[in-house]
Amino acid sequence: MAATGDSAAGHRLNLDPNEFGTTSESSASVETLEQILPRMKVAIPGVTFEVVPNSAPGAEPSWLVDREHALSAAFFLRDDSTLRLDYCSNVTGVDWPERTIKVKVRKGEPGAEKEVEETRVVPGYLEVVYHLYSMAAKHGPVVLRVRTPGRGNDVSLPSLTPVWRSCELQEREVYDLFGVHFENHPDLRRLLMWEGFKDHPMRKDYVPPDDYEYEPTPHDEILEKAQARLARREASS
Amino acid sequence: MPSHGGATAKVPTEAGAPRGPDAYRLTAGDNEYDDGSLLEISMGPQHPSTHGVFRMDVVLDGETVVKLKPVFGYLHRNHEKIAESASYLAAMPYTDRLDYFCSLTNNWAYALAVEKLAGLQVPERAEFLRVITAELTRLQNHVCLAGFLMQDMGASGTPLMYGFREREKILDLFEALTGARMMCNYMRFGGCRCDTPPGWLEEVRKVVDRFPRFLDEFENLLSSNEILMARTQGIGVLTRDLAINAGITGPVLRSCGVDYDLRKVDGYGLYPKFQFRVPLGDHGDTYDRYMMRILEMRESLGILRQALDAIPEGPILDPKSKLRGFRPKPGEAYGRIEAPKGELGFYLISDGSPNPYRYRIRPPSLINLTVLEDLCLGHNVADTVTILGSIDIVLGEVDR
């Protein structure tokens, strides 16, 4: 560091220009999936990679990878010589409960087809989203998604912490708040909630407890609330 | 019983958790530490140098740190869940409380993500106001950081009060503009909440013009101070590869020589129009991290001067933006800015309803703590305090 305090003109620095960045003014664009997929299929046989469209204006689509090949796909994305996605910025979970959607299907005899609305049930799943950038090539983002088979209490995904260490605390947070277990994570503990907390608060069907105290308070109002809730739960199950 | 952490929580063993109730105890059961010569201490959450309710479990061999685990969550209020149950605009005041030193940059990051999600344009005057307020925020954050760092080293009070004196002038400007000193709640989707009061820009110029003199004085007193150099140079060295792999951003990243500043890389807002340079460090030690802040302040002053010269008249809010009944179309967006502490990002998923379906904050303070143990190992316990101070965290953002 050759930095020294400058006198009157504080904004004009008499520093070696080599000490300052020469970053280009805007991000370069990343290759599309069609360009990458052939290379990837050679490197990782059997990988399935598909584009999840995104209808927001000016926002990027994301890539869905199957969970068996997620770890090797992540290594490929990091180490590929043109992609060089060396920086994993953001890791987060998304909860998608089971939902029914309406799909328009063409039905009927050939020639006299009619558009019919059908309802379909999409099974619920948990999703982990990774936002990847390249500090070396200064491009990005590549949005990588991995999905769990269901949304039970023991769903698991491969941890990407061996690839990017920035996932370490963020995957702990996803485990804490969403309940996704990450295989081969070095230190999978709750991050924000206390040890021994039972539920996963960011799930959409989470019901907050009547009382956060460790000992249930023998207070009429709280006991009434708890009993009413238990009765509701029994009635619904 | 309802399945919450209630009556059953006295046995904190959880199915699936890799470690049981001893998870926070570093020495118990670890054979390599069993000879009794090591001491496990808990620094925090009330330790004055942890800048809030932050705790480190430290294992010491004499004075030397051999293991360190940060413990989070004392300030957790599940901000993300609160925001998902309210409208888009209702989350804006909550973003002030994330990094409460820098509420205006938090506002900007959230507004940027929503604008990307909904496709809103920002008028030029509003963009200028955003740049001015964000750079003022950077100034007051960095000047306080330098003061706190000295405080951590034992320079009790005086440098910190010098920093606070300058910060107070900037907070007065914020109060005149937004009505609040810290919880500004200033930006809106597609612009800003209100225009400048009469004479505000001249006041900003006065503060900006006086600031270099303070900075020179501060540097003359401190940057070549023997104690500062002895306590920071070569301490807590962060290597370039580890910094990139661990997702470190902001001045901490640039102190190890990685040229990555989102104002240049993404060119969000009006930053491509401004002339400024990105300071880079050589060694990645605590001294470089301190120096990055000083150099960034000088660059910020340059940006402020250019912005004050060029700010046009005009509207400050996109006429298409709606304060009430705002429903973005289904989709998702990730917006990020260069906040004073690093990359602050907001990831939003809209399902077409007035509430965000998913609202996620990428907190630079939390992710920069990934390498805390790597930086502290082998140093004295007193150095962990300066290393933590030089990383620059705010617990409102770490725990959310």
Image (cartoon, rainbow, N blue to C red):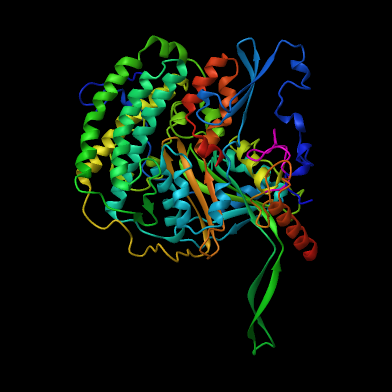
Residue B101 can be seen, yes or no: yes
How many numbered marks are there? Answer: 0
Give the vertical position of B385 relative to B122 (above or below): above
For this orientation, the residue located farthest to the bottom is: A112
Q: Nearer the viewer, residue B373 or A183?
A: B373
Along the viewing direction, whichever of A155 and B34 lies nearer the viewer? B34
| Residue A197, magenta (yes or no) | yes
Residue B62 shown left or right of residue A214 in the figure: left
Pick the front one: B68 or B324: B324
Image location of residue A56, percent across then percent down: 48, 61
Q: Is the C terminus of chain B in the top left, top right, bottom left or bottom right quadrant?
A: top right
* Residue B162 drawn in magenta: no
- Residue located 76% across and 11% down the image: B35
> Can residue A35 be spotted in the picture?
no
- Residue at the spot x=55%, y=24% of the render? B47
Q: Position of residue B230 (x, y in %)?
A: 44, 11
- Residue bounds of the magenta highlight: A183-200
User: Magenta segment, principal secondary structure?
Assistant: loop
Specify whether A73 is left or right of B79: right
Residue at figure coordinates x 46%, y 36% from the top left: B342
